[in-house]
Image (cartoon, rainbow, N blue to C red):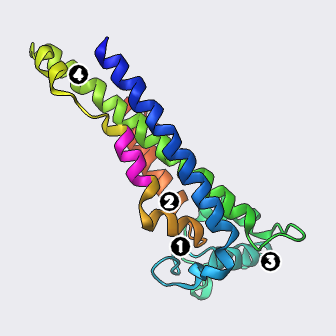
Amino acid sequence: MKTEEKKRGSSSRFWPWVIASVLFRLLLVYFSKNLHLSSRPEVSNPLTSLRRLAEGYWLKQLSVSPYAGSMYHGSPLLLSILGPLTALRLEGQPEHLLCSLLFVLVDIINALLIRATGRCLQVAYGQSLKSLDLVKQSETSGIILSGDLAALVYLWNPFTIVACIGLSTSPVENMAVIVSLYGACTGNYL
């Protein structure tokens, strides 16, 4: 019973931080033109640049290989998924607004997957303790919900925030890794 109360208390503290992270990212998206993050090599390089992805998609539309001449170095899957978003322009909106909002959403999904992975690992840890008859020790130790903590560290990591706002494709690439880890943890393989 006490562990359920701890989980509810931890969960009630988790969501305000997630909402604050989303609001912070949206605020930075609004001021992203003034920050010039997409031109920083630490944030956006030839492998992760949305600008390069847009050029690669444009070449693909012209039936020219985007990989010829070293114009585009990213994944063909990213070219197919994110390429059409780079071609969309909303009148009166900043350039690549849809991609920025998509990256914010992907970061939130990544954090929720990290949280779910942590909870799966927590359940497995609890089952291991039960099999060793160490349940009483685990209840008194006050285990911190590692999934919540890891998700919040991911959301508030400065590089994660800058990559999201700096029009880098890193959040989508991170998602592929996190989905793989979650699938391995739950035993759901693709």
Structural distance between the alpha carbons of marks 3 and 2: 26 Å
Q: Nearer the viewer, residue 17 or 69?
A: 17
Kind of residue at disc 1: Thr
Q: Disc 2 vs disc 1: Cβ atoms closer than 8 Å?
A: yes
Asked if residue 123 lies left or right of residue 151, the reply is left
Kind of residue at disc 3: Leu
Asked if residue 179 lies left or right of residue 61, the reply is left
Q: Give the SS element for disc 2.
A: helix
Residue at label 1? Answer: 48
Residue at label 3? Answer: 62
Q: What segment carries the magenta color? A: 148-154
Badge 3: few (under 14), some or many (20 or more) residues near its Cα, within 10 Å? few
Residue 92 image position (x, y, % from top left): 88, 71
Q: Disc 4 vs disc 1: Cβ atoms closer than 8 Å?
A: no
The answer to whether one can see residue 95 in this image is: yes
Name the magenta segment's main secondary structure.
helix
Mark closer to the chain start, 4 or 3: 3
Residue at label 4? Answer: 126
Asked if residue 79 lies left or right of residue 2, the reply is right
Structural distance between the alpha carbons of marks 4 and 1: 39 Å
Q: Which mark is residue 173?
A: 2
Q: Nearer the viewer, mark 3 or mark 2?
A: 2
